[in-house]
Image (tube, grey):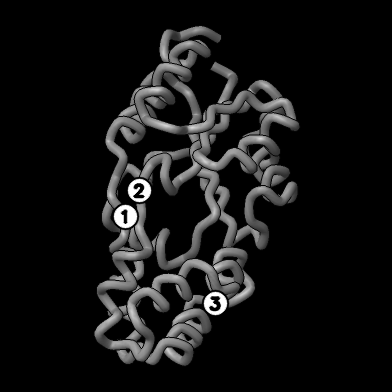
Amino acid sequence: MNKVVVFDLGKVLVDFDYGILARKIAARCKMALEELAFFITHEPLLYHYETGLVTTEQFYKQICAATGYCGDLEEFGLLFGDIFTPIEPMIGLNKTLRQRGVRTYIFSNTNELAVRFIRRAFPFFNEFEDYILSYEQGAMKPDARIYDAVEKRTGRRGADILYIDDRPENIAVGAARGWQVILQRTPERTLAAVEKLGFLNGEK
């Protein structure tokens, strides 16, 4: 099969909850739990980290300065990463596609600490052809530049790319480039859509 399948990571292959991190570190921070959870997800710092504008060390130091967190970087990295749970039907889909000779890729807005943890904790992460990650590309979806990187890394364009993501604004950019797209609402609906498109029955 000449076509490729490109998976988002968060909420597609793994679920995540930054509230878990907030609850784990709240007792060692000067911020209240609610304020801490909001800070982690809504302040520009995470965006800067996931676009590669700050390093892991800089991100950690700025978190400590803002929240009063007093653990070391190793501890923080483990806590920061331990917010993920695998979405097993989607992991199974990747395995099935690869067994049928379909090349698969991860295309994600993410960061070094998350990838480091997921790679170590979940063996499935290593079962992809390549990885197009925002912090390495210096751009986040839906920025056109990171979609350009997908086409360059896969060697495919237009309908030869099937793209699965849970964010409508990200899907819209792929669709505008002629990609086949699936907006993930549930794994079951995604699997049915992939099968309908012929990726699970050997169609070329």
Rendered residue at 68%/30% (across/down): 175
Q: Secondary structure at mark 1?
A: strand
- Residue occupied by mark 1: 84
Quadrant hosting residue 31:
bottom left
Q: The N terminus is located in which quarter? A: top right
Rendered residue at 28%/63% (across/down): 82
| Amino acid type, callout 2 | Asp
Vertical side of 35 occupied by 106: above or below: above
Sequence order check, earlier mark of 2 and 3: 2
Find residue 120 and name its label: none
Rendered residue at 40%/77% (across/down): 36
Residue 172 appears left or right of 77: right
Residue 184 appears left or right of 160: left
The x and y percentages for residue 161 are 62, 27
Residue 85 appears left or right of 13: left
| Amino acid type, callout 3 | Thr
- Foreground: 38 or 189? 38
The x and y percentages for residue 120 are 30, 58
| Distance Cα–Cα, label 1 vs label 3 | 21 Å
Q: Secondary structure at mark 3?
A: loop
Sequence order check, earlier mark of 2 and 1: 2
Q: Looking at the image, do the residues carrying marks 2 and 1 touch, with CB atoms under 8 Å apart?
A: yes
| Amino acid type, callout 1 | Phe
Rendered residue at 41%/67% (across/down): 113
| Distance Cα–Cα, label 2 vs label 1 | 6 Å
- Foreground: 204 or 198? 198
The x and y percentages for residue 13 are 38, 41
Sequence order check, earlier mark of 1 and 3: 3
| Distance Cα–Cα, label 2 vs label 3 | 24 Å
- Residue occupied by mark 2: 15
